[in-house]
Image (tube, rainbow, N blue to C red):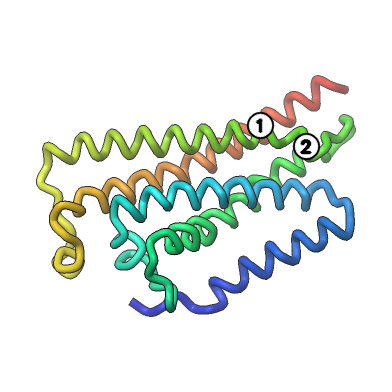
């Protein structure tokens, strides 16, 4: 597999740095909410990927483009946790920021979004953990195979783990989307009641 192009590593870092600079320079609540969402979901992604990289490092070394010069598991988890989650955090934060400031109701300060966003993160973590546990439990009764190319690179005892990790990553993405939608609806409802 080709190495991850440098721009796919640099662009998110530059974007987040520029967003942080804008937030320091100007008080733009929607951008501050976006930065909050990026920070929260990226930190969650980094923690989740610390578990993932220990269950099956091959999930990052075989099923993802390699990051040049990065092979240490902890750093792989941090890098992929950020790269896989920052954009979801941006969408979560910005959409929550719009719902918290748009319309005729009094706008909410960004600080009022911290606890609701933490609830979304806790929901994502719970769904991912339940999915991972369920998949790992049920896979014990099945003969799990990976394609021949991957089978040579993944030790037999970790082949179930790669399926488990892939499944709970999909569950985390899906629950983050669902949690974001519910959060926005909840914010809109709470603000409409404050009029």
Q: Is residue 102 above or below residue 12?
A: above
Relative placement, left or right, of 107 versus 176 is: right
Circle 2 is placed at which residue position? 111
Percent of width and height locating residue 85: 54, 54
**Element under disc 2:** helix
Q: Residues within 10 Å of mark 2 (few under 14, many from 20)?
A: few
Q: Position of residue 73 (x, y in %)?
A: 38, 61
Mark 2 / mark 1, whichever is N-terminal: 2
Q: Which of 72 and 130 is in front in this view?
A: 72
Residue at 54%, 42% in the rendered image:
177
Which quadrant would the N terminus be assigned to in this image? bottom left
User: From the viewer's perspective, is residue 104 above or below residue 95?
Assistant: above
Give the distance between the C-alpha atoms of the residues marked 2 and 1, in whole angstroms. 10 Å
> Could you tell me which quadrant the C terminus lies in?
top right
Residue in the image at 72% along x and 36% along y: 113
The picture places residue 98, in percent across and down from the top left corner, at 77, 43
| Side of 84 relative to 159 (left or right) | right
> Looking at the image, how many numbered discs can be counted on the residues?
2
Q: In this view, does 1 lie above or below 130?
A: below
Give the residue pinned by disc 1: 116
Query: Crowdedness of circle 1 by 10 Å Cα count: few (<14), some, many (20+)?
Result: some
Compared across the picture, whether 110 is left or right of 91 comes to: right
Is 16 drawn above or below residue 174 in the view shown?
below
Residue nearer the viewer, 58 or 70:
70
| Label 1 element class | helix
How far across and down, in percent of the image, does residue 54 sit? 33, 52
Depth check, mark 2 against mark 1: the one in front is 2
Observer-nearest of 99 and 167: 167
Question: Residue at left 57%, top 52%?
Answer: 42
Q: Which residue is drawn at 20% across and 48% down?
A: 160
């Amino acid at each position: 597999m080709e190495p991850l192009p440098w721009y796919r590593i640099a662009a998110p870092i530059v974007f987040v740095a520029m967003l942080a600079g804008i937030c320091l320079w100007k008080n733009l609540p929607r951008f501050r909410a976006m930065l909050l969402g990026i920070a929260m979901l990226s930190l969650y992604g980094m923690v989740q990927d610390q578990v993932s990289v220990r269950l099956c490092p091959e999930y990052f070394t075989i099923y993802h483009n390699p990051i040049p010069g990065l092979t240490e598991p902890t750093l792989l988890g941090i890098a992929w946790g950020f790269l896989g989650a920052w954009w979801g955090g941006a969408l979560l934060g910005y959409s929550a920021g719009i719902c918290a400031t748009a319309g005729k109701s009094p706008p909410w300060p960004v600080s009022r979004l911290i606890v609701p966003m933490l609830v979304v993160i806790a929901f994502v973590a719970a769904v991912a953990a339940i999915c991972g546990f369920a998949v790992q439990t049920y896979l014990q009764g099945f003969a799990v195979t990976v394609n021949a190319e991957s089978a040579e690179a993944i030790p037999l005892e970790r082949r179930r783990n790669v399926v488990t990790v892939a499944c709970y990553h999909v569950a985390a993405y899906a629950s983050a989307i669902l949690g974001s939608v519910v959060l926005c609806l909840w914010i809109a409802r709470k603000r409409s009641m404050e009029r």
